[in-house]
Image (cartoon, helix red, strand yellow):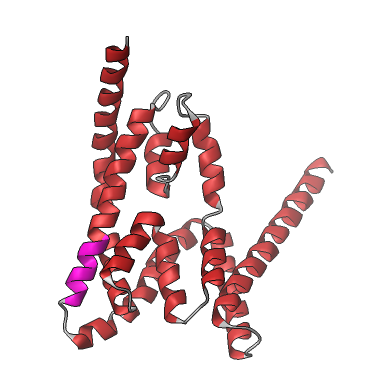
Amino acid sequence: MSDLAISRELSEFRKGIQAGISIGIGYFPIALTFGLLAKTSGLSIYETVLMSLIVFAGASQYISLSLIAYGTGIFEIILTTFIVNIRHFLMSTALNEKVEEDQLLNKLIYSFGITDETFSVVATKEGTAATGFLFGVISVSYSSWVVFSGLGHLIGAGLPKTIQESMGVALYAMFIGLLVPSMKKSVKVVFLAILGAIFNSIFTIGHFMAQGWAIVTATLLSAIIIETAEVIKMRNRSVHHED
């Protein structure tokens, strides 16, 4: 029986690797760009690879680079990345109903590898997702992200100084590239981005608070206002529907 169980897990692991290859390929340009920007932001290759090893979250790592460039404190960086990754609570809860029953240790290990991409692959899999399948998907995506982050830093180190300094513009281009697709899908995201930009500009230009806290406060305020407006809108619709 134990041999059959091991054979099944290996089979599921191979299926996970096959399913995760597309994620690994997709991570190639993003992780490479992160490595390049990390180099131009002043991070060493060890710091760059270590960040990818222990964080493994593209959006958070890009935001961290911008905050580091502003000289933001550690607490503000941690709080900002926590806010950005709050959605992982929902994704983890959804996957908990999808995966097979297993010991807590295994769940703790593969929960670290949950990203938007790995979540999508596992969530859309037919039937229950085996532990081996999750480890297969995550091992490919995680390895790709870490390796190409380091490779990007090495490539950045070999670029001429003038190009390295100009790479800072790519960070803003990356944020725009991440934001625009979401703005096309939802008007709420458009208002959220505009409101966040306005609050951040007010706090920064008016010198009300440090750059790091300005970003955190602007994000929280805009999210609270937009979600409050959404709740009021839904209630009004409900009242009109009842009438």
**In the image, what residue occupies the spot 29% across and 66% down?**
46
Tell me how many marks there are: 0
Which percent across, then down, holds residue 158?
Answer: 15, 77
**In the image, what residue occupies the spot 43% across and 33% down?**
106
Which percent across, then down, holds residue 178?
Answer: 41, 63
Which percent across, then down, holds residue 235?
Answer: 77, 50
Tell whether 195 sits left or right of 43.
right
**In the image, what residue occupies the spot 47% across and 59% down?**
182
Q: Is residue 110 above or below residue 84?
A: above
Quadrant where the N terminus lies? top left
Q: Which residue reaches farthest right? A: 243
Q: Is residue 31 above or below residue 174?
A: above
Q: Which residue reaches farthest bottom? A: 206
- Magenta stretch: dominant secondary structure: helix
- The answer, for residue 23, to whether it is visible in the render is no
Q: Is residue 152 above or below residue 97?
A: below
- The answer, for residue 115, to whether it is visible in the render is yes
Tell whether 128 sits left or right of 82.
left
Which percent across, then down, holds residue 38?
Answer: 32, 72
Report the front residue among 166 and 13.
13
Q: Is 151 included in the stretch rendered in magenta? A: yes
Q: Is residue 87 above or below residue 217?
A: above
Quadrant where the C terminus lies? top right
Residue range in magenta is 149-157
Which image quadrant for residue 110?
top left
Q: Is 15 included in the stretch rendered in magenta? A: no
Q: Which residue reaches farthest top? A: 1
**In the image, what residue occupies the spot 27% across and 44% down?**
140
